[in-house]
Amino acid sequence: MATAKLRLNGSEVEFTPGDTILQVAWRNGVKVPTLCYLKDCTPTGACRMCLVEVTGARTLVASCAMPAAEGMEVFTDTEKVHRARRLAIELLLSSGEHNCLLCEANGECKLQEYAYEYGVEAGRFEGATQKYPVEDSNPLIIRDFSKCILCGRCVQACNEVQVNRAIGFGYRGAEAKIITTGDRPYDQSDCVFCGQCVEVCPTGALTEKKAKGLGRPWETKKVRTTCPYCGVGCQMWLHVKGNRVIKVTAVEGAQPNRGRLCVKGRFGYDFIHSPERLTTPLIKQSDGSFAAASWDEALDLVANRFLEIKEKYGPDAIAGVSCARSINEDSYNMQKLFRAVIGTNNIDHCART
């Protein structure tokens, strides 16, 4: 593929036509901050954190939206750039109630990170009065509009990544906020609770309700695993504190899900620590009670009952349904068991139900 060249902070670098300045910088190890940029989505230039200086340009330019050009000279670390970024952070901090001490995103908030990095303190600008109450009427997601910086990442995640089209921008000016159709609560809207909006939110505006108060980021360790809910094999991080899973996030860039999860994968982990979870096979007794058994005892019982039913009623008296959570090889073995061993074609798959 044809390449072109530009100068980045005094060094000549190559790029592919169509790349943005931000992509060129990141690819060459140059850190450029951003709050609104979301990979593989249409750049918006909303947060103004990625501003850079381009020789000959009338003003600073948003590097996430500006295409790189042959012979362009770009500076990402000048005092003019730093002043603009500090101003953007100050304005964002004054736009709501960013109390980092009590925020669930403390330690993971990008706005907090940049405020610390650039030495910005809130207070120079008078903050706007928060007009919208916290929404926590659903069991999974908390929306705190006082911490929303209107970066639009949640909207892009919903509309361009997951393509659920449940949320968008609503109202205008100081009244602007992220809304569902008709500005209804999440649980009364078209939201399917995939949680992708929570995944990409750079502040504490969107947080997981079930994880509230269970642990700070620095108190947890991340364990990579495969989602147990279906055979797709989505990669996820288990956030573990004290041997207890407190929340789940997707592994960015990992195949096959590429940082995405469904409602079950992201929020359906309660069963892990449920006191009702079975830990051993149970065999039903004649009085209706259940007795604990070993796997050998349970499997022998099932095999013997299958043989009795087949001998008395024929193989077609037996049917099986393979689980969609199984891998393909297990489903193949199950249909082979029913067709070749038991002798019936009464085998189906629960993904069709």
Image (cartoon, rainbow, N blue to C red):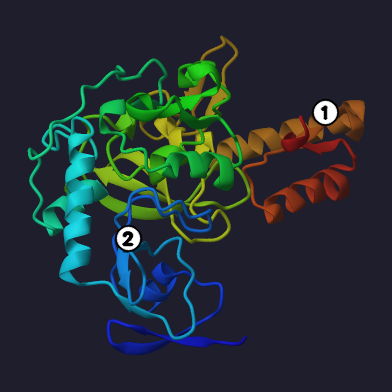
Question: Can you see residue 108?
Answer: no
- Label drawn at residue 50: 2
Check the image and name the residue furthest to the top. Answer: 287
Check the image and name the residue furthest to the bottom. Answer: 12
Left or right? Give the position of 287 relative to 309.
left
Can you say whether 1 is above or below 26 in the image? below
- Label drawn at residue 309: 1
Which quarter shows the C terminus? top right
Q: Position of residue 89 (x, y in %)?
A: 20, 48
- Label drawn at residue 125: none
Can you say whether 81 is above or below 339 in the image? below
Left or right? Give the position of 45 relative to 40.
left
Q: Position of residue 170 (x, y in %)?
A: 46, 27
Number of numbered tags placed on the structure image: 2
Which quarter shows the N terminus? bottom right
Say which amino acid is labelled 2. Cys
Element class at badge 1:
helix
Element class at badge 2:
loop
Disc 2 versus disc 1: distance between alpha carbons?
Answer: 70 Å
Question: Can you see residue 81?
Answer: yes
Left or right? Give the position of 94 relative to 313.
left
- CB under 8 Å between callouts 2 and 1? no
Rendering quarter of residue 145: top left
Say which amino acid is labelled 1. Ile
Q: Position of residue 105 (x, y in %)?
A: 24, 40
* Residue at 58%, 57% in the rendered image: 256
Quick one: 170 or 104, which is closer to the camera? 170
* Residue at 49%, 16% in the rendered image: 184
* Residue at 51%, 31% in the rendered image: 167
Quick one: 251 or 125, which is closer to the camera? 125
* Residue at 87%, 46% in the rendered image: 339
